[in-house]
């Protein structure tokens, strides 16, 4: 007991952060559990020699000013969010010892989601949950742990099951999760119970210090002011009444078999980052693109069809190939209100000049892969423009007479190659051949850089050639 | 040339990692989800942390923790998620924690839709959480800028110990364009932070907090923050000007709208109309002085926005009634077409 009575070195000698004249006493009321639990934690940190490594998170509640007292790293956080902040702290510096200290309003009400998920992830935190069955700080309102019949400022007739439901058993809930290593409910009553709490505090901290494990210690604790009791009545109420609703004891303990968690991050040098981020040089063959660099290109392409026809990738391949010819390019997918009924479209711009708007309202080229797309976009094509459509799927020809129309039985041709999905690449091949703004050789050579599935490169190349062949034959 | 063809949402992640960002905490939401996807892939590989948080509230608080510990850290979301983050943003501003928050705006209010809008302007630029605070807000309008302004965001965040937003719309997040990535920032170039809490002896006297119980203390803290914002307003304004030199008409827009305006200006110039564009790259600090100067010599302004008129309020404040400020908008996920903006200009010209 002597050791507990001596002020731990983990506490500041003088509480300089406390405003006002009194820099020696704490802000806690006589008989309050917070002060006792602070002492047990400070003593353990001192004994384990981890004062410097410790970061104490002050919650919102009566312990909001814990940082006045603990000479450790301190972070004060929003109401209920300590386990999330603790996650960020611990992951940043896995060697730090992070304590999330929270009241019942903080942890079980407003912060319910954060504690459940931090526990479930098995964050390397030690959580001290001070259950005093009331909101101490704000003047004694009901907490989720307030007992049935207990009178508080917001349950003036006593908590009723009908209106407020039952007191929440956080330890039991946390203990159902797989990741927590050690969960126990203890109390601050007589000396014996305090000594037992001391043991639980130390064990919980040890689990973090040695193995980065998540522990949860629920501490039944008196709030004489909130309960409108004397300290002695308070201690008795914790011991006799609270324990009936909140059975003490270990709810979960896998510390023997728990192997430990490693939150350390990989050490990656900045010089390695380009490789790690897949940042690669795009090959641009100056010699091969030479015949194209003087071309004045300003194509605005709308590509549309069913989802699954490769409409979006038709667009990205065209743009990527354009980029390899030093054109300015942009690609904008349909999404949002346009993306209904399984149709997809994208806007591609390929230009010799800087691209302003990436939106294509009036395409110079429409690639229609299905009937609804032709119906929808035909009228928008600029006069003198081009419509390419999949004539194996679309049962009508465009009605416009002021545009060039190229029907390509792309799906049928793709089937002949043994893969319906390659119809989009047949169109790529055809379009590139027809427009003459890109080198077919470059397209064939670099298609492998663009595709995700490298095993499909030969098939894609075949399709591009087949599309080009088609144009050659009709020209 | 080391060009890569990428989505804006991917570009911002690669840029962030090159800027030394070591942690990403976020909750998925369209049209920002590719940011989480790319972050999940690249952060662990690059020696960083990625966690899919249980909510945006948790995500921003994880950011609060990582920033307290001195890491360069980011999160990303869209409208509904940004609303949830505001509590944490206010705490970050109060505790003066550097962090980067990306908002890929979608349609609102409520669940709205996933199409692009610019209706988060007020909640981001005006400080949507409680208290007298400001965040620095950068507004990229290209995939390249998603990288470049993303990198700048981390520098500004550290320089001013302040949260920085990247505010853009679904189109800029979703579209693909070529990007050139810079070399990674060297660790020595990231400023040392003596105020952080890292679980070390040197940092054990530090405290990260936003509480000041005493009104005089809190007023002092607020005054200090306001002073910082003033310096930011003096030093960090960034704009893009296009044909403003001799412009009689100035169109103002940011994000995707500025791309459309850019093209409209080309059209108008071809028709002989002396039009120019002012694009705020920083929304806070807002280019008040620049607009005020232009107000001396132009005939009128036209602000185009995908909102009910949120930025135009700031334009009007800057113009101070010196010249008419017209407004053209679309909402709900519709993007103003070049024709709409063009015709609006012509219509106003006829009126005058
Ligand atoms: C978002 C938010 N809502 C409400 C409050 C007001 N508030 C401060 S402390 C508190 C209750 C704290 O109760 P508890 O967590 O049980 O801590 P105790 O004071 O009992 O130790 C509340 C509701 C706040 N600070 N922030
Ligand atoms: S109000 Fe209750 S919890 Fe708060 S300090 Fe007083 S006794 Fe402790
Ligand atoms: Mg309480």
Image (spheres, coloured by chain):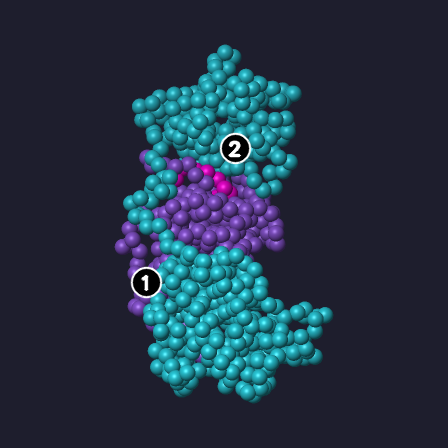
Chain colours: A cyan, B purple
Q: Are marks 2 and 1 in contact (CB under 8 Å)?
A: no
Q: Which residue is mark 2?
A: A312
Q: Where B4 sits versus B222, above or below? A: above
The region drawn magenta spans B171-180
Q: Is mark 2 within 8 Å of ligand 1?
A: no
Q: Which one is nearer the viewer's eye here, B12 or A323?
A: B12
Comparing B21 with A63, the one in front is A63
Please, which chain is the residue tagged with disc 2 on? A
**Element type at mark 1:** loop
In the visual, does A404 lie left or right of B1? right
Question: Do pointers 2 and 1 mark residues of a single chain?
Answer: no
Please name the residue shown 53% across and 81% down the image.
Answer: A189
In the picture, the disc for residue B309 is none
* Residue A252 x, y percent position in the rendering: 52, 63
- In this rendering, the answer to whether B346 lies above or below A412 is below
Which residue is at the far right?
Answer: A162
């Amino acid at each position: 007991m002597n050791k507990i009575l001596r002020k731990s070195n983990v506490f500041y000698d003088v509480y300089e952060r406390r405003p006002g004249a009194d820099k020696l006493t704490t802000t806690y009321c006589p008989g309050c559990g917070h002060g006792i639990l602070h002492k047990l934690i400070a003593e353990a940190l001192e004994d384990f020699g981890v004062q410097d490594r410790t970061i104490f998170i002050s919650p919102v509640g009566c312990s909001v000013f814990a940082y006045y007292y603990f000479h450790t790293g301190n972070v004060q956080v929003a109401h209920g969010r300590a386990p999330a902040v603790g996650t960020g702290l611990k992951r940043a510096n896995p060697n730090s010892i992070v304590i999330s200290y929270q009241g019942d309003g903080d942890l079980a009400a407003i912060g319910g989601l954060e504690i459940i998920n931090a526990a479930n992830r098995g964050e390397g935190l030690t959580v001290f949950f001070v259950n005093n069955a009331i909101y101490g700080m704000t003047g004694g309102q009901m907490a989720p742990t307030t007992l049935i019949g207990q009178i508080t400022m917001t349950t003036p007739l006593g908590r009723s099951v009908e209106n407020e439901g039952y007191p929440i058993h956080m330890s039991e809930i946390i203990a159902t999760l797989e990741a927590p290593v050690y969960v126990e409910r203890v109390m601050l009553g007589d000396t014996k119970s305090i000594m037992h709490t001391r043991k639980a505090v130390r064990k919980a901290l040890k689990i973090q210090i040695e193995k980065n494990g998540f522990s949860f210690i629920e501490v039944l604790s008196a709030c004489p002011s909130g309960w409108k009791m004397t300290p002695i009545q308070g201690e008795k109420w914790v011991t006799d009444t609270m324990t009936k609703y909140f059975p003490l004891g270990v709810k979960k303990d896998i510390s023997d078999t728990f192997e430990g968690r490693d939150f350390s991050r990989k050490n990656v040098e900045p010089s390695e980052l380009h490789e790690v981020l897949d940042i690669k040089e795009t090959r641009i063959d100056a010699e091969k693109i030479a015949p194209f660099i003087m071309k004045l290109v300003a194509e605005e392409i709308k590509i549309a069809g069913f989802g699954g026809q490769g409409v979006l990738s038709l667009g990205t391949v065209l743009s990527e190939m354009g980029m390899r010819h030093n054109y300015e390019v942009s690609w904008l997918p349909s999404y949002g209100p346009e993306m209904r009924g399984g149709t997809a479209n994208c806007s591609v711009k390929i230009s010799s000049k800087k691209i302003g708007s990436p939106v294509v309202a009036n395409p110079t080229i429409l690639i229609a892969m299905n009937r609804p797309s032709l119906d929808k976009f035909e009228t928008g094509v600029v006069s003198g423009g081009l419509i390419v459509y999949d004539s194996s799927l679309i049962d009508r020809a465009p009605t416009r007479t002021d545009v060039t129309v190229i029907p390509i039985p792309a799906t049928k041709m793709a089937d002949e190659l043994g893969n319906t999905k390659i119809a989009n690449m047949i169109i790529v091949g055809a379009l590139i051949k027809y427009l003459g703004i890109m080198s077919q050789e470059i397209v064939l050579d670099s298609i492998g850089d663009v595709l995700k599935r490298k095993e499909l490169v030969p098939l894609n190349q075949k399709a591009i050639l087949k599309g080009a062949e088609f144009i050659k034959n009709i020209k | 040339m080391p060009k890569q063809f990428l989505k804006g949402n991917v570009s911002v992640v690669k840029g962030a990692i090159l800027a030394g960002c070591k942690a990403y905490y976020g909750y998925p939401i369209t049209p920002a989800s590719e940011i989480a996807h790319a972050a999940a892939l690249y952060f662990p590989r690059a020696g960083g942390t990625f966690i899919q948080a249980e909510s945006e509230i948790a995500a921003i608080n994880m950011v609060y923790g990582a920033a307290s510990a001195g890491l360069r850290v980011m999160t990303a979301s869209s409208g509904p998620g940004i609303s949830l983050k505001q509590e944490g943003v206010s705490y970050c501003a109060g505790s003066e924690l550097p962090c980067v928050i990306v908002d890929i705006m979608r349609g609102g209010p409520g669940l709205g839709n996933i199409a692009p809008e610019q209706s988060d302007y007020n909640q981001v630029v005006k400080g949507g959480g409680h208290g007298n605070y400001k965040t620095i807000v950068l507004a990229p309008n290209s995939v390249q800028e998603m990288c470049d302004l993303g990198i700048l965001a981390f520098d500004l965040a550290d320089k001013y110990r302040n949260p920085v937003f990247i505010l853009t719309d679904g189109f800029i997040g979703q579209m693909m364009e070529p990007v050139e990535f810079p070399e990674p920032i060297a660790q020595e170039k990231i400023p040392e932070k003596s105020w952080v809490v890292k679980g070390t002896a040197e940092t054990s006297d530090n405290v990260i907090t936003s509480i000041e119980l005493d009104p005089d203390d809190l007023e002092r803290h607020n005054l200090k923050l306001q002073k910082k914002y003033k310096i930011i307003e003096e030093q960090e304004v960034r704009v893009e000007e296009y044909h403003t030199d001799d412009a009689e008409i100035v169109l103002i827009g940011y994000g995707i709208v500025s791309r459309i305006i850019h093209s409209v200006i080309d059209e108008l110039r071809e028709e002989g109309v002396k039009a120019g564009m002012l694009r705020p790259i920083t929304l806070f600090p807002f280019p008040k002085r620049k607009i005020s100067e232009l107000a001396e010599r132009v005939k009128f302004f036209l602000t185009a926005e995908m909102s009910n008129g949120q930025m135009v309020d700031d334009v009007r404040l800057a113009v101070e009634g010196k010249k008419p400020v017209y407004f053209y908008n679309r909402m709900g996920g519709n993007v103003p077409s070049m024709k709409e903006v063009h015709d609006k200009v012509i219509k106003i010209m006829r009126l005058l």
